[in-house]
Amino acid sequence: MMLADSYGRVATDLRVSLTDRCNLRCTYCMPPEGLDWLPREEVLTSGEIARLLRIGVELLGIREVRFTGGEPLLRRDLVSIVASAASLTPRPEISLTTNGIGLTRRAADLREAGLDRINVSLDTLRSEVFRKLSRRDRLPDVLDGLSAAADAGLTPVKVNTVLMRGINDSEAPGLLRYCLERGYELRFIEQMPLDAQHGWSRTEMITADEIFGLLSSSFTLTPDEERARGAAPAETFLVDGGPVRVGVIASVTRPFCGACDRVRLTADGQVRNCLFAREESDLRSALRGGASDEEIAARWTAAVASKLPGHGINDPSFLQPDRPMSAIGG
Ligand code: SAM
């Protein structure tokens, strides 16, 4: 069985949200007071996640697993969840998207458990801006977490940056220089309409074209012909002739839905075909209701079969999904 949709795409990359909670309060993601978190009993246990991972990998052709959230490092059982993914056959590629807080203590154990790679989110190198943006004073923890990830061999260490007008856009060249000096791969992500406060606006968003402009004052960027993009969301560019690169994820201005190979599982066990999907399919009630592996696989297959051709952000009728990014799993 495969997770195929009716547009010829096959989902092989599973994004698993492990929690909707976060220890930061980034202004473009959630309000200062946080959100109404999922009740604990609705969040999948590590045993339930392990079972869905096994069904995904062994029955449905999942080949890459990325853990995200909310903040996945808030799960105390993260190491055992990673280990359960690493024990599967064929063994999937395993990666983690995190804000990096607490990585200094956990990077080596995660590596040992089978984590292959890491993406750390970093929007600024200025403490004052970090404090304003994330409403927490944790920049040193994030930077230390990044270097701990590199020391533990969680490479290539990737850094994700969302640029916002008048807030951190002037830092684009500085962030790239910082990453190049340390061997991290930086990817700029266009801000998407997924914030809990529904404050996103197209004119405020920094577009991919603007990102090139901001970087071009300090670097020469050329398209990276060698690296086939495939289903990767990032378009990559050689910096000053290479071999170092920078990526841009232009979800809004250059959508890449036609090559999408992703499927998502929320922390409460719902399958979603897209960050912007308005529908979910409930695997948790099947899991808890005594369904067999084959029944769960069939439900999952049916969910992916109905995947829409595109995210629709640019359609006049676009409606932001009910759940914000932190609850879907970014
Ligand atoms: N807590 C983890 C982290 O910080 O990476 C994982 C979850 S977080 C939602 C994943 C990524 O989504 C982060 O890089 C964050 O900056 C990004 N993000 C959050 N809201 C976004 C938005 N509205 N548009 C684009 N990216 C967003």
Image: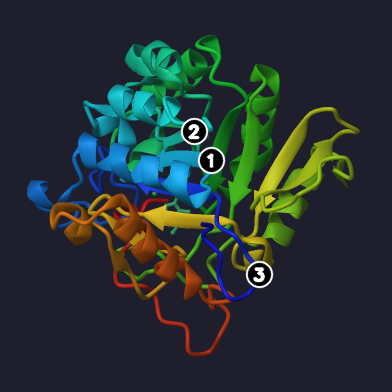
| Residue drawn 72% across the image and 49% down it | 214
Number of residues whose C-alpha sits closer than 10 Å to that of mark 2, classed few (under 14), some (14–19) or many (20 or more): many
Q: Distance between the residues labelled 1 and 2?
A: 8 Å
In the rendered image, residue 22, in percent from the top left (x then y), is placed at 26, 42
Disc 2, SS: strand
Residues 76 and 46: in front is 46
Report the residue marked by disc 1. 64
Provide residue 191's location: percent of width, then percent of height: 52, 59
Query: What residue is shown with label 3?
Result: 8
Label 3 or label 1, whichever lies nearer to me, is 3
Question: Circle 3 — which element?
Answer: loop
Q: Which of 279 and 205 is in front in this view?
A: 279
Q: Is residue 45 left or right of residue 192?
A: left
Instruction: Evaluate whether residue 93 shows in this view.
Output: yes
Question: Relative to 312, does residue 81 appear above or below in the rendering?
Answer: above
CB at disc 3 and ligand 1 closer than 8 Å: no
What residue lies at 30% left-to-right and 64% top-to-bottom? 196
x then y, percent, for residue 102:
32, 21
Q: Earlier in the sequence, mark 2 or mark 3?
A: 3
Q: What residue type is labelled 2?
A: Ser
Residue under circle 2? 95
Tell me, yes or no, whether the two marked residues, 1 and 2, touch with CB atoms within 8 Å.
yes
The Cα–Cα distance between marks 2 and 3, rounded to whole angstroms, is 26 Å
Quarter assignment of residue 78: top left
Q: In this view, does 310 lie to the left or right of 75?
A: right
Q: Quadrant location of residue 140?
A: top left
Instruction: Give yes or no for contact between labels 2 and 3 (Cβ–Cβ under 8 Å).
Output: no
Number of the label disc, if any, that sits on residue 27:
none
Secondary structure type for disc 1: strand
Residue 68 in picture, x, y percent from top left: 39, 42
